Image (tube, rainbow, N blue to C red):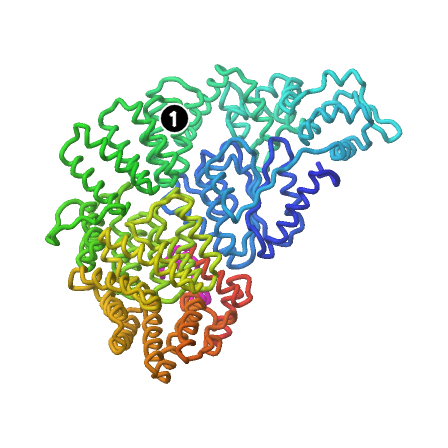
Amino acid sequence: MKLPSTGARRSIVDEIDSALDLAMNGIGPRTLVVTAGPGSGKSHTLRRLVSGRGIETRWATADELSWRQPYAVAAALIGVAVPTTAPAGFDTELYAAVDSLCAVRPQLLVVDDAHNADAGSLEVLSHLAAAAKDLPLVVLVARRHLPTRELLTRMLARPTVREWNLPAMDAADLEVLAHEVLGAWPDAALSTLLARSGGNPMHALTMLTELRAQGTVVVKDGRATAPSMLDASASSSLESAIAEQLSLLDASSRDLVRKLAVWGGPATLAELADLGDTSAAVMVGAAQTVIDAGMVDASPSGELTFTHDVYADVAYDGLAPPLRAILHTEVARHHEAAGNRQMVAHHLLAAGGDESVLGAAVSRAQEELQYVPAVAVDLLGTATATVAGSFELDLATALARSGQLARSAEVATQGLSNATDPAVVPLLYRTLLFTSIAQGKSQHALGLISSTLQMPVDDATRAGLLDTQRYVSLLEGVTPVPGGELGAVQGPVSVLVTEALRRFLSGAVDSGLNLALEASQQEGAVGAGFQLSTSADVWPPFIELYAHGPVAAEALMDRAQQLRTDRGAAWMTAYQDFTRGGIAMKRGRLDDAAAHIDAGLERAGSADMGWTSIAEGTRAQIDLYRGDVEAALARLDAFESSGQPHQFGLPICGMTRVSLLESGRKLLPAVAAARRYWGGARALGIYGWLPSFAVDCARLARRTDDGEFAAEIVDTLAEISDPLPVASVGPVALARALCAGDSEAVVAQAVRSAENARREGNVIAEAAAWEEAACELAASGDKTTAREHARTALLITQNMGATALSSRIAMRLRPLGVRLDPRTVRERPRTGWDSLTRTETTIADMVASGRSGPEIAQSLFISQRTVQTHVSHALTKLGLRTRVELAALVAGRRE
């Protein structure tokens, strides 16, 4: 069938064609989705779109069996063999394979009938949809509206994905179709008859095929017509037209079609013959009949498949349920002999019967899905609906593991209302508690804990709940941090984590760090298996950033990410990306910081995760530093409208708004906002954070002559317990000097703070300190030294691309008689080799040495997704398209 050249349908196809052209040239969305109903010509549209593209194209089509075979569609698409049981990290192997393909040349990946794909493949597809913007990769997908697939819905919501609904054929399209089939243009009567297809290409084609087979179409003088008496009897729907075709088959051919429909996917004649007392040879005639009828195709390997899944749907629905159950049981028997546990479970569930038998089959199948929880969700969803009250806990856990937190909570809640086993109830509560915490629904989590504590629970459970209550209260950050002694702490890992966070927030940063490191070490002694509540490996580098600065934190970050890999704790990847982004920002690597945070937010968004306030505020700060005020404001507004909590009560987003006001020279609103956020943090007792923004607040108090705020800052800093962590010593001393207004002290403390910050790797703090020294010296008349310090500060801010900071320095010095144009200070070029960041240069060298994306990620302890982002940035700056070209360039430079 050829797509018509007229009508609205053609316009849509032309639009998709143009979007595909742009995508292949790196413009616009790189993932394109065609959505339409059954028989609407999706597959033909895909073939038309990719024809003659001149790009390496890989194609995979999902069938009815695909969703029961983990990674089957993705592996077929990429050309990787799927083991019988998908091992841990197999998805990473698939990503690595795509990464390797894209390293050589641009790729076009096409997935047809994605609604039938297994959930593991849909996760891979969603990942590729996000990664496509950083790879020479375009993804083209076709799907039906139904069945609804959660992972497809999430993918379609991504801003990097664009969807088109393929419209029905109009009258002109149908005339072209009739001409192609009959070799003549239809007259008015036949056109009216074809209009009953509703513009569905397959329905119209089926009607024409049926009429021609009956010999009732008359072609004369280049016109095709049909007797008017056919109008009333013509099939009114595609399904009825297909049913009419099936009814014309002989009994053995109908039997073959029904067996193939129940089988659910490609099958050999031998396999279908095994479902009855017959042989493959006896079925040859029937097979040839349905092949000749255009209903079934035979592959070179001898597998039979329906030419269109509508044939399978109609044949299956037309089979009486008791007969359908018999065939499903026979298919299950066949797969039992082959050792395919998932297929056995599926067919037994479809057949129905003894619930104990069904439950046992599902439990055996789950063993093959340990590392593919998204696929387990599909199996357990069916099992939960079939075997009452048996699999809610397993389903809720699988949903949580696959990142579908909202659905996990729904299932756990439903399970609690149905649970009769007292051993299952606390496990369902634990799952529900985990999903609530992970989504940032702290009030709901605290309510769950409170209600559970009213129940008769054992001492260990009560202690665990009380500790979780303390942990959630700290995360929520709406009540003051509890006081307490700093003595030895004993208990499970969760207790150590909670106390580590309490100490850090209250200002005992070094003590909190030591306890966090101890918790992470003890985590390694915990038995294998999925842990719903551990976060021990997340916090050491996060706290270290406040204790000893970004260089020390970076070293701990490398260790933490290796532990995450070793322990299979992939869920914490997003939070570690956030921390690494914060470290990179402090070190002045704004491109790297943005890449890390974007990767983390992408992962968090796809998994319904909360607690992103620190990441969002930091990412907005990066936009501001780069001078993109609109992007920073849009990000902050979007976060505030989301209703997500501010983690630990830290006003990171608020202080970014203060910076925005200051950059816009709105000093009075800026200092008013700074006072509000500083006072709120003081009231909460989060002294571990306050020193990191003390200089910013003191600068505003000094610039606006706000003595009250200056006094409040000094009083607050005096409340922080000694000894101060190393990273806080310089900022606290400089802030005190600024608030006191002692010019000599400001200069001395600013220089000392800048030197300390340089040793700690805190480029942002170093530039800020040199800025204060320059302004103070200029105000006191030493313009020569002021100019030197200002140039040092500008060199730092220019080299990291922080144009907003450069502008602030120049703007503050101008009224003091020191005029410096930031553009005259050397800065990193925006293109060419010298424009690359340190990380981009390192990765480029590793690419040239033959290291793959996964190898680079493992070596640098970053995610493969982040490596792709860095490579993409390097390619853009160098004007290259693939890693092969990058490797050649690096090799040339070495020579």
Inspect this view and state whether residue 845 appears: no
Q: 502 left or right of 598?
A: left
In the rendered image, the vertical position of residue 15 relative to residue 804, given as above or below: above
Residue at 32% over, 42% down? 438
Name the kind of residue labelled 1 in the image.
Ala
Q: Is residue 862 located in the magenta-colored stretch of the structure?
A: yes
Of the 4 image quadrants, the one containing the N terminus is: top right
Q: Secondary structure at mark 1?
A: helix
Residue 72 placed where, x, y %?
Answer: 47, 40
In the rendered image, the vertical position of residue 41 relative to residue 888, given as above or below: above
Q: Tell me which secondary structure the magenta stretch mostly adopts.
A: helix
Frontmost residue, 606 versus 545: 545
Frontmost residue, 189 versus 185: 189
- Magenta residues span 844-864
Q: Quadrant of residue 370?
A: top left
Frontmost residue, 643 versus 78: 643
The residue to which callout 1 is attached is 383
Q: Is residue 803 located in the magenta-colored stretch of the structure?
A: no
Q: Residues within 10 Å of mark 1 (few under 14, many from 20)?
A: many
Residue at 62% over, 42% down? 46
Residue 886 placed where, x, y %?
Answer: 51, 66
